[in-house]
Structures are given as C-alpha cells and as structure tokens.
Image: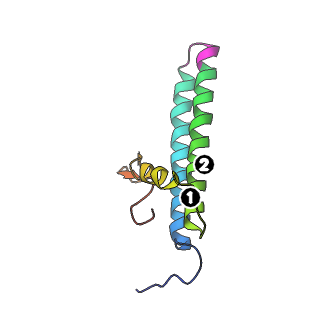
C-alpha cells in the first residue's frame, strides 16, 4: 500500500502512536522493576534512592518522547537533537513479545 505523507509531520499518526505505546510500556517495565527493588529495600535511605532513580528515569523517557515528537514537526531543532535521536536508536528494551528492540527505529529517526 503506497502512502504519501501530506501533512507537516514527518511521521504518520500510527508511527507516533506506536512510539507512545513503546514509551508507555518501557515506563511500566521500569515501575515494575523499581517496585521489586522497593520490596527488597532495607532502609529508608535505600527507598528514597530507588524512588529518586525511578523519577529520573521516567522523566528522561518523557523528555525523549517529547524530543521525538518535536523532531517529527517541521521546526528548526537545537544542534544536539540529532545526537540525542541517534542515542535513542541505541537504547534497547524488552518489548511485549520478549524481544530486545530499540526505543526509536532508524525509519522513525
């Protein structure tokens, strides 16, 4: 099926939807992993550190998604944006099928 992108965005809506779903899945995975870590925490300090790390990692995920969405829009981006996008193409996670995959595909970047 031939599709022509006729709007200003560089990604099709289903591509953006897929990206958002991958980020949501990764965030849930992180929350699960941190919940296990919290269950095994032995001190209040350790709990605090685990909570801080979860907050930092979920914030980073949200910022990554924001960068991807901004990059898909017709705009001039900061010079380091392309480096950040390339970095996201090297960030791996385990998808819903148990396969190791990248957060951002080459086609989406």
> Which residue corresponds to mark 1?
20
Q: Residue at x 40, y 66 (%)?
A: 107
Q: Is residue 81 visible?
A: yes
Relative depth, front residue between 77 and 87: 77
Image quarter hosting the C terminus: bottom left
Q: Position of residue 47 (x, y in %)?
A: 61, 21
> Which residue corresponds to mark 2?
62
- Say whether residue 43 is magenta: yes
Q: Position of residue 91 (x, y in %)?
A: 42, 46
State the CA–CA distance, disc 2 to disc 1.
Answer: 10 Å
Relative depth, front residue between 83 and 46: 83
The part of the chain drawn in magenta is 41-46
Image quarter hosting the N terminus: bottom left
Q: Residue at x 37, y 52 (%)?
A: 101
Q: Is residue 26 left or right of residue 100?
A: right
Residue density around tag 1, few if under 14, some if 14–19, many if 20 or more, within 10 Å: some
């Amino acid at each position: 099926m031939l599709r022509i992108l006729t709007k200003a965005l560089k990604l099709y809506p289903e591509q953006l939807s897929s990206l958002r779903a991958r980020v949501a899945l990764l965030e849930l995975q992180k929350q699960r992993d941190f919940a296990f870590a919290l269950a095994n925490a032995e001190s209040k300090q350790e709990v605090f550190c685990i909570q801080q790390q979860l907050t930092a990692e979920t914030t980073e995920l949200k910022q990554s998604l924001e960068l991807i969405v901004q990059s898909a829009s017709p705009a001039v981006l900061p010079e380091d944006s392309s480096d950040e996008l390339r970095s996201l193409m090297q960030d791996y996670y385990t998808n819903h099928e148990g396969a190791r995959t990248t957060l951002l595909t080459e086609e989406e970047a």
